[in-house]
Image (cartoon, helix red, strand yellow):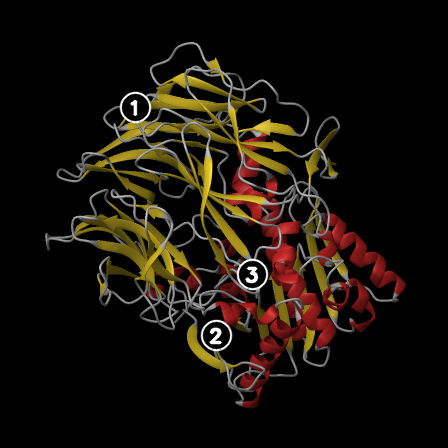
Amino acid sequence: MARRITIDDAVRVPLPGMDLPVKPRFTPDGSALLILQAPPGSVSRSLWRVDLESGERRLLAAPDDATRYSRDEELRRERQRERGAGITDYQLADDGTVLVVLGGRLLIGDVARPLAPLDAPVGVQDARLAPDGRHVAVVSGGDLYVVASGGGTPRRLTDDAAPAVFNGLAEYIAGEELGRQLGAWWSADGTALAFAHVDERSVPSYPIPHLVGDGVEVEAHRYPFAGGPNAAVSLRVARPAGGRSTEVDLGMRRDDYLARVVAEPGGGWLVAVLPRAQRSLHWLRVGLDGSARELWVERSDPWLNLDDDTRVLSDGTILRSTERTGFRHLELRTADGGFERQLTGGDWVVTSVVGVDEQRGEVLALTTRAGVLERHLDAIPLDGGDPRRLTDEPGWHAVAVSADGRRWVDTWSSLERAPAVVMRSRDGAAAITIHAPSETAESAGLTPPELLEVCAADGTTTLQAALYRPEPDGSRPPPLVVWVYGGPHSQKVANDWSLTVEMHRQLLRSAGFAVLVVDNRGTANRGLAFESAIHREMGRIEVADQAAAVRQLANRGEIDGARAGITGGSYGGYMTLLAMMREPDLFRAGVASAPVTDWRLYDTAYTERYMDTPEANPDGYRDASLLTQARSLTGRALVMHGLIDENVHFRHTAQLLAALSDAERDVDLVVFPAERHGERGDAARRQRQRRALSFLEAQLLGE
């Protein structure tokens, strides 16, 4: 029987069974793995080397008590949704050199001994290790420098940084919405560096005051609001020896996006430019001298989703994944960009390419071929033929592959079983356990959700759902809380341990609520048509599907449809309040965290991808806004928001409060003065759990 979940359980970190090593990578000689792992009971990770023959573990780098993230590192963690602490990433060169950026400092060494400090300009914002390990490109004060890995005087590559002008870093929109965290890319041989030059002066400066602590601090963020100007981004090429950089003519218009930069084995880079309308992707070849030539253009309607699957093979052949067929699949292109052949097809998707084994002639990729609820590693022939599944255990697999494709580290879990980390081999050698699962659902005293299917509001489409059932009380069906996200590029229902240890849902389940999670139309990994159902009208289909799922459970007598609430954060916060406004007879109560309240207040790349611009789609923006529907809110709502949220500004909640006041409506409000988009502080996390639970109990359990 499941144990009673408490507030302490809901905020404790690490979560049960989540004390595993992360970001494993094989050393260049294949004799060892590098991993990030925290001590028992902690989330502060250190960098370790694990010998694959002896099992010996050697500490390479660790944070100390004085380590503090710089503001750049803090914001980068927000962009990456990184919840770990200590060392959260590292870089590994082909010669075994290892680089860590921590607290504005650099640590460097090789895989055989502890890392040591590397002298660099003060206040490192980011750094990129060359593939040959000889140099490090460093960004400080918005300018680029190059430092020899063995030490020495930094060489300055740029000198034009100014307020809102910088080099070698990703602009806000690239990191938050395009999945591009980098702003500098070495050539494969380490002889040249391509880097982004960013001019944000035309982008509005949005002030975020810090209202707690000593002194007065105001963060000024250049935030590109939907319909407004983007940063001007260009690509430049420089040599580590110094001298003037060369600006690359990519044919970019003022508001276009620099989407992807991929180093080619033969020298130079493949560069992808995404026009602001996001319906095409233009691929160019950029030479070491800064020359550029367009190779091909990919097109998609109503929008184009970016990926990180591009690989250039040793003969120059280009591997790509696209949604040209309506589902993300692999294709090959010639060295000049011409279409050669399709490698995969069907009503399933490739979710990521994790390696290429050229000797065997195979691509290694994670796919949904066995069903959208699981991820498995497939070997896909480069010369055509059926994929072959390499992972046996049911559940969710994440994989890191060796450079030669012969071995891989498999991190896998299921609803019943915490993650294991195992090294496996293509030659049938015995698996090596790097980390044994520390929990099962039974040992952790948790009840996994039940995976089920429901029908979408259109009456035909099947949706995946997860239902957390409370202990039966023998009287009547339980009240329901819908936990919702519902936005594009998301999948929340899966045969994965992370669902079992979603402790807010377990807290609600333990308190007597049934908790329902549904991947409505508009979410990811079911094909472009499924996702793009929300085009130009965010919120309508998503709410309809969530409501349809609740009514189906109520009609079957599994939940009490008269006692239904809803909760979510960010897009889920938006969905929570919109569902209460559009389905007031169904959703009596809701808890919304950091809600988007009007899409005109959100950023360009995300919002315009799905909604077009406010000028082109005024009716869609008006109908999707919570501000225009405030009078429809009749149930009780609790809104929680961090005052220094730089993603969904507190301005969203402030404008909602004003609209509700005008409509003579009211909500309860919890403000976190020192928190950003997701609460990190222990006190704020406890308050969030406590207030949400007590609010929903008062609204839905009191009858």
Amino acid type indicated by mark 1:
Pro
Badge 1 marks a residue whose secondary structure is loop
| Quadrant into which the C terminus falls | bottom right
Badge 3 marks a residue whose secondary structure is loop
Neighbourhood count class around disc 1 (C-alpha, 10 Å): few under 14, some 14–19, many 20 upward: some
**Residue 513, percent from left and from top:** 56, 73
| Mark 3 in CB contact with mark 1 (< 8 angstroms) | no
Residue 47, image quadrant:
top left
| Quadrant into which the N terminus falls | bottom left
Badge 2 marks a residue whose secondary structure is strand
Q: Which residue is mark 1?
A: 114
Residue name at image x 56 percent, y 58 percent = 279
Q: Which residue is mark 2?
A: 467
Residues at marks 3 and 1, CA–CA distance in whole angstroms: 47 Å
Residues at marks 3 and 2, CA–CA distance in whole angstroms: 32 Å
Amino acid type indicated by mark 2:
Leu
Q: Of callouts 3 and 2, which one flags the residue occurring earlier in the amino acid sequence? A: 3
| Mark 3 in CB contact with mark 2 (< 8 angstroms) | no
> Observer-nearest residue: 669 or 676?
676
Q: Is residue 212 above or below residue 6?
A: above
Q: Which residue is mark 3?
A: 303
Residue name at image x 51 percent, y 56 percent = 10
